Structure formats: structure tokens, C-alpha cells
Amino acid sequence: MFDCLIYNMKEQMALFVIENNGKTVLIDTGTSSEVDNLLNYLQKIGIDHLDYIFTTHVHVDHIGGVKRLSTQFPEAKIVVSEFYQKPPETKFPKEKSDLAEYHEYLVQNLKNRVIYVAEGDIISLDDLKLEIYTAPGHTPEHIAILDRKNMNLFPGDSIGGHHLGSGFSRPTAYPPHFNYESYSKTVKKLSQIDNIKSISLAHFGVATGPEVQEVFKISEDVFKAYKDTVVESYQKNNGDLNSIITALLDKFGRSPNEIKHDRPDSLIFRTLGGISIGFINSLGLESKFKVDSE
Ligand SMILES: [Zn+2]
């Protein structure tokens, strides 16, 4: 596990490197700004090539470094969901979305290096098998990866953001792609995989032993608690976004990181506003808000 110090903050974004009998994998990339930190880290641990770069989903903290890293490691194959094989216009009509942009980049620049994967596909690092699970909800094309040798799951953002150090969790429920129903199914599906020994969380830390099932439980409970608060406040305040955000802040508070870095209220409101809209849209409540991509 490598803390890429995203936006110069500790314990916010973990990237994972697997090495097995000389074969190497990177899971997620950070944004392009953290690539230098990553390259220093890889050098320090003696990794001079990457066989595969997995991107779990389209968000910039998970794929933003792909351009630089694919240049730095020309041998690396880029592993993404088969979702991207469909022409973007069939999936994302009209709107110019981040998914469409990423798709365009893969097709135009990395064409011969992309491996499209589906549920049950295996990428082998010698005797270490990485199995793909589709994990929609946070975004529609999200994949989770299971290291079958160590029974370690890499869920990306598909089961929420849980900061194991502080114990703070917040739903990864951002518009325009969040779908609550798919999310719940994904959590259920992944939690039913037999014998998971650890979960390597992008945001943030590695859960082991009894923590594994606790993480799945929190993944369900925290989303439900936020959803209930959003719905209750939406109905009580006739859909007023500021009231919904205030209700979330009153009930769940700021994250330890927001407190430590003295993050301005405007940024916290923006985050909670995104989450509110994510739930409102996904639940089919009448949306009164303009949606922008997070
Ligand atoms: Zn994400």
C-alpha cells in the first residue's frame, strides 16, 4: 500500500502495488500530480517495470495518472472494464461526460495496450490470480479485483470511503453516475465472497480479520443513514438543498481530515451537496438541482 499524498494530504488515497515472481501490478493511479510520488516509491521498493495498470473506475483520483504512467511504463497493459468497449455515444448520449472522455483516450492513445475485462475474468501474475468482479453503483463501469492467492479484495470506491485510522466513513455517492440500488447489490455481492482475508481500501487503509465484515456492514449502514437523512430533510424542507446539507452536517459532522486541515465550509458544503444530489437523483426524487460531475 502506498499513500500517494493526494492534494498533499495524508491518509486520503491509497494506491496498491502487487509483485509476484517478478510480475507487477499497480491498482489505481492517483491524479497526474501524484505520479512523481508514486515513481519515487516504486524506485525505492525496487520496481522498474509494470506489467499491468488497473483502473477501478473513471474518477480522476483513480485514473488521472494513466497518461503519464502509460508513457513512463510503455510495456504496461491497461486493464479496464469492458464497459468501455461500447462506443461512448451509445452509453452517454449528448452529454460530454468524464466516462466518454476517458473512453476516447483509451481508444485513441492506448488502443493496443488496453485489456477489457468482465465478471469472472482472470489476470495472472504467475501463480497469483487476480479475479474481476463488476461492481457498479458508485459508477456504472466500476470493477473490484480479488487477489485469489492472498484472498485480498481491492474494491476501489465501490463499497464507500472508510478511513480505517479515524473510523470516519462517508458515502461515495456523487452525481451524475451514482446509483443506490446497484451500489447496495454490489456491497451484498462482494460481502458474500467466501473467505476474504483482507480489504485494501483506496480511501483508506487495509482491513483484516474481523474488520472485513465490519467494513461491509458500515458500507451498508452509512449509505442507508445518509439516504434516510437526505430523504427526510428533502420532504421536510421541500427539496431545499441547503437544508439537506445542514441536516447531514448536523447529523454526521465533519471528517477528521476536514477539521485538521481547517477546510472551509464552502468546500464541505460542496461535497455534501454532491452526495445529496447523488441520492436525490438515484432515488428518483424530483431533482431541483443542476448536476455536475465530481
Ligand atoms: Zn470514485
Image (cartoon, rainbow, N blue to C red):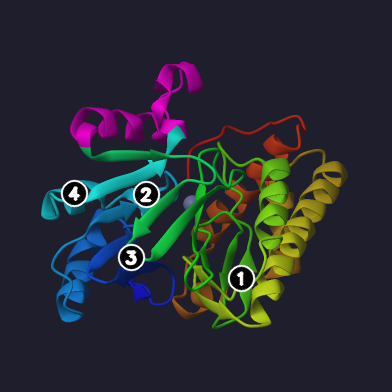
User: For the residues marked 1 and 2, what is the alpha-carbon distance in whole angstroms?
Assistant: 28 Å
Residue denoted by label 4: 70
Q: Main secondary structure of the magenta part?
A: helix
Marks 3/4 in contact by CB < 8 Å: the verdict is no
From the viewer's perspective, tell me whether residue 189 is left or right of residue 204: right
Marks 1/3 in contact by CB < 8 Å: the verdict is no
Q: State the residue in front, 161 or 46.
A: 46
Q: Secondary structure at mark 2?
A: helix
Which label's residue is closer to the chain start, 4 or 1? 4
Camera sees residue 4? no
Residue denoted by label 2: 60
Residue denoted by label 3: 7
Task: Sort mark 3 into few (<14), some (14-19) or many (20+) by Cα contacts within 10 Å.
Answer: few
Query: Over which residues does the magenta segment extend?
Result: 83-112
Q: Secondary structure at mark 4?
A: helix
Q: Is mark 1 within 8 Å of ligand 1?
A: no
Depth check, mark 2 against mark 4: the one in front is 4
Residue denoted by label 1: 196
Label 4 is placed on what type of residue?
A: Ser
User: For the residues marked 4 and 1, what is the alpha-carbon distance in whole angstroms?
Assistant: 31 Å
Which label's residue is closer to the chain start, 1 or 3? 3
Label 1 is placed on what type of residue?
A: Ile
Label 3 is placed on what type of residue?
A: Tyr
Counting from the top left corner in percent of width and height, residue 102 is at 34, 35
Asked if residue 3 is positioned above or below residue 173 in the image, the reply reads below
